[in-house]
Each structure stands twice: as structure tokens, then as C-alpha cells.
Amino acid sequence: MDEVAHPGNPRRRRDGSTLSRVRSISRAIHIMRAFSPERRHLTLAEIVRATGLDAGTTRRILVTLKDESIVRQDDNTGTYCLSLDMLQIAGAVPEGNSLRELTESRLMRLARDTGATVFLSILRNNSAICLARYHGESAVQVRWWSVGGKLPLNCGAGPKVLLAHMPEVQRKSFLDSNLTQLTAKSVIDASILQRELDDIRETGWAITHDDVAVGLSALAIPLRNADGDILAAVSVGGLTAQIAGEGSPRCLNDLLRCGEDLATLVRSISPASIPTE
């Protein structure tokens, strides 16, 4: 049953879909979403442009969020940023936690064994979202993709693995869209990208060079449950010399062994429990 009796509205739904919305809360969330790992500090004008709200409304909401310690304002520059209290709130988010917690120990060992940076990424709204990141002991650590950050599906090994295993209709729709170019090596030709995706499905892994940041390479495999469903992508990233090798990539055997170990840990996880929107 998803409906309950209620005075004046005997068929009100439990999920709240029949209730009116609180517009001020929606606006506050739009403002918080204006911030990102690439845009940590924003002026009032930049927030207005990002949200489409008028300056007066935006400033009133920012003042309220500041009073609640959700955002803070730099006394010298006047710019706004999210506060550390947001980390406490984010720590209470359950989505994806089971997958992250189940894989954490093994992914940390992969980072130690390879010296590279290890990423666990999931598909959401035609983007790859970094669910977890673990650094190895390399002097150069890959910090381009922070936890919660997104990458276009045509850039990077992990994103391409997720794209390669998307349902065909959804994948075709993405290939028909305007593909993002992060560097000169990013593949934005749909026919070339399609051939790469075919190779990824055939070999079971992806390798990319310079398409997210020049000088960096990444290697990735899909993470599947017992039914063969794709849950996420596991990737290692670092300097090209650290990842690439003559013949097979340097970290491939370590990554494949990690994938086999992880498959036993996540065998019972359903794709429905992984955030997709």
C-alpha cells in the first residue's frame, strides 16, 4: 500500500508526491549544488548565474545558510564556500556505502601494491561519479578526480568501462550527444569511441592516456555481482610511465586479481542499491 487516508485528502500518497513543495528549500539546494570540487569558492554574482535566482533571494538564502553553518563567507574576498559541517552531513549519507565499505580494504591494498591511485566509480545521470579514492605511495598522486566529482563518460578508463556496459539504447543516446573534450586527446568522434567500447567489452578492461589530464594514464575493469550485473568500475591512475608498459599495462595483473577478489565480496549486491540518479 502506498496511499493512506487523510482528512480532506483520503488518498494522499505515502511518498509525498501529492504534497505541495517548499520553494525556499529547493532554492537553497540549488545554491548548495552550485559549489563543486572545481568551484569551491564563489561570489554572489557567480552563484546567481549558476542558479538563475535573483540576487536578493540568493543573498537572503546565503545569509540563512551561513547562520546555520552550512556555508561560510570569506571576510576578505566576500566569496562563499561550503562549511566543514557539510562533511558531517555527507557522512550520514547511506547511498553506496555498502559497496564502498565492502571494497575499501581490498582497494587500499591495490593502491599499496601498485603505488598508483585507485578509484571506485559509479554511473549517474550519464556521468561517472567517483565513489571512493585511495592513494598509493607514489610521489605523484592523482588528485584530478575527487570523491563525489564527476567525469564525462568518454574521458578516462573508469568512465569508458561504465559507458561500454551501459544498455545499448542509453549508450547510443550518449554517443549521439555532444561529447566533452577535456584535453586534445579526449575522444569526441562517436565512431572512434564506439570501436574503443567494443574493444573494452571484448578484452574486459580499458586503458586511456592523456584524455583527462596530459601526462596521466588510467586502467580500469568492471565490477560485477554474482549475476554479472555491472555495479561500478575499478581503476588505477598515475603517470603514464607508471601505468603503461610494453605489451600489457603494468598494473593489469594486479587489477584483475583485485577484481576477482572483489567479485566474491559484492556478489549479493543489487544494481538497484547503487545510486543512478
Image (tube, rainbow, N blue to C red):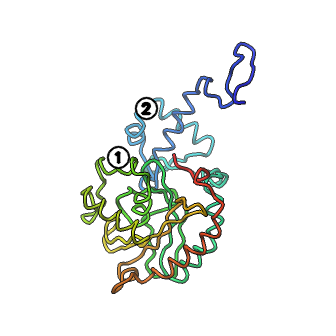
Q: Which mark is residue 51?
A: none
Q: Tell me if 139 is positioned left or right of 175 in this view.
A: right
Image position, residue 48 (x, y; %): 41, 37
Which residue is labeled 2 in the image? 53
- Check disc 1 and report its element: helix, strand or loop: helix
Q: Which mark is residue 173?
A: 1
- The one of 221 and 236 positioned closer to us in this rendering: 221
Coordinates of residue 196 in the picture (x, y in percent): 32, 65
Say what amino acid the circle numbered 2 marks: Leu
14 with respect to 249 (left or right): right
Residue found 74% across the figure and 19% down from its top? 6
As rendered, which of 177 and 20 lies closer to the eye? Answer: 177
Looking at the picture, which amino acid does disc 1 mark?
Ser
- Up the image or down, 275 lies above or below 146; here it is above
The spot of residue 133 in percent (x, y) is: 53, 67
Q: Is residue 170 depicted above or below 184 in this figure? A: above
Please give the name of the residue rendered at 42% of the width and 41% of the height, measured from the top-left corner: 47
Residue found 52% across the figure and 74% down from its top:
135
Above or below, 13 against 165 in this view is above
Quadrant housing residue 202: bottom left
Quadrant into which the N terminus falls: top right
- Residue positioned most to the top: 8
